[in-house]
Image (cartoon, grey):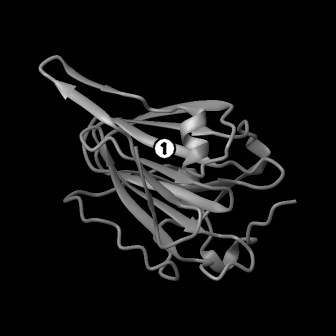
């Protein structure tokens, strides 16, 4: 597997080894020992999955301490443009983001450590998105950030149709309206 560093410390893109032949493909999507060797120390305890149509935006989300989550995300079928925003208090890259296209075709994974808001826009209908979390979901700790806050300067791709956003996600505050993340 190939692990790519990004412009923000700790955020990684993982390119697993994929073995293709006339039957299809084989890919090891997670191996704790190999991922630890690559610098991903998280002990994953929960897997989640979502199915979405083209134009759906999910995020930007995170969990507040003490239920903060690191995530390892991937697309099983379809494609998304995935984003991680640094919301760590005092970070030199606070408010900056990293983005990557994840698809069933490229099979890339995105590692998002604790202290980042995460979200994506779906690029293809019937996209199946899967992710691992290193802590269990806690509804009282759920937080969000406005996905199109001008302060963030996120250049969301034009997908040729209107976006679909949940009522909860459409009510998230801008960057200057959140309490920056810190591990407690």
Extreme-front residue of the structure: 37
Quadrant in which residue 121 is drawn: bottom left
59 up-or-down from 154: above or below? above
Residue drawn at point x = 54 percent, y = 38 percent? 34
56 up-or-down from 175: above or below? above
> Considering the image in quadrants, where does the C terminus appear?
bottom right
Residue drawn at point x = 60 percent, y = 52 percent? 39
Quadrant in which residue 9 is drawn: bottom right
The image position of residue 120, as x and y in percent, is 43, 54
Mark 1 secondary-structure assignment: strand
Q: Which residue is mark 1?
A: 73
44 up-or-down from 7: above or below? above
Q: Is 168 placed left or right of 98 in the picture? A: right
Along the viewing direction, whichever of 132 and 155 lies nearer the viewer: 132
The image position of residue 123, as x and y in percent, is 27, 50
Residue drawn at point x = 63 percent, y = 56 percent? 113
Q: How many neighbours does mark 1 have within 10 angstroms: few (below 14), some (14-19), or many (20 or more)?
A: many
Extreme-right residue of the structure: 184
Residue drawn at point x = 54 percent, y = 61 percent? 11
> Considering the image in quadrants, where does the N terminus appear?
top left
The image position of residue 137, as x and y in percent, is 71, 38
The image position of residue 6, as x and y in percent, is 46, 67
């Amino acid at each position: 597997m190939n692990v790519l560093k990004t412009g923000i410390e700790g955020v990684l893109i993982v390119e697993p080894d994929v073995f293709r032949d006339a039957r299809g493909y084989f890919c090891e999507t997670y191996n704790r020992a190999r991922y630890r060797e690559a610098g991903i120390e998280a002990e994953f305890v929960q897997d989640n999955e979502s199915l979405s149509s083209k134009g759906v935006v999910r995020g930007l989300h995170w969990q507040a301490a003490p239920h903060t989550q690191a995530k390892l995300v991937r697309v099983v079928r379809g494609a998304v443009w995935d984003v991680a925003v640094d919301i760590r208090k005092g970070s030199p890259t606070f408010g900056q983001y990293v983005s990557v296209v994840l698809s069933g075709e490229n099979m890339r994974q995105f590692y998002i450590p604790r202290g980042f808001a995460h979200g994506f826009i779906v690029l293809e209908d019937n996209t199946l998105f899967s992710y691992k979390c290193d802590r269990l979901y806690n509804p009282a700790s759920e937080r969000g950030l406005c996905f199109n806050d001008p302060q963030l300067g996120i250049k969301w791709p034009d997908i040729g149709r209107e976006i679909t956003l949940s009522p909860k996600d459409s009510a998230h505050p801008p960057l200057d309206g959140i309490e920056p993340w810190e591990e407690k």
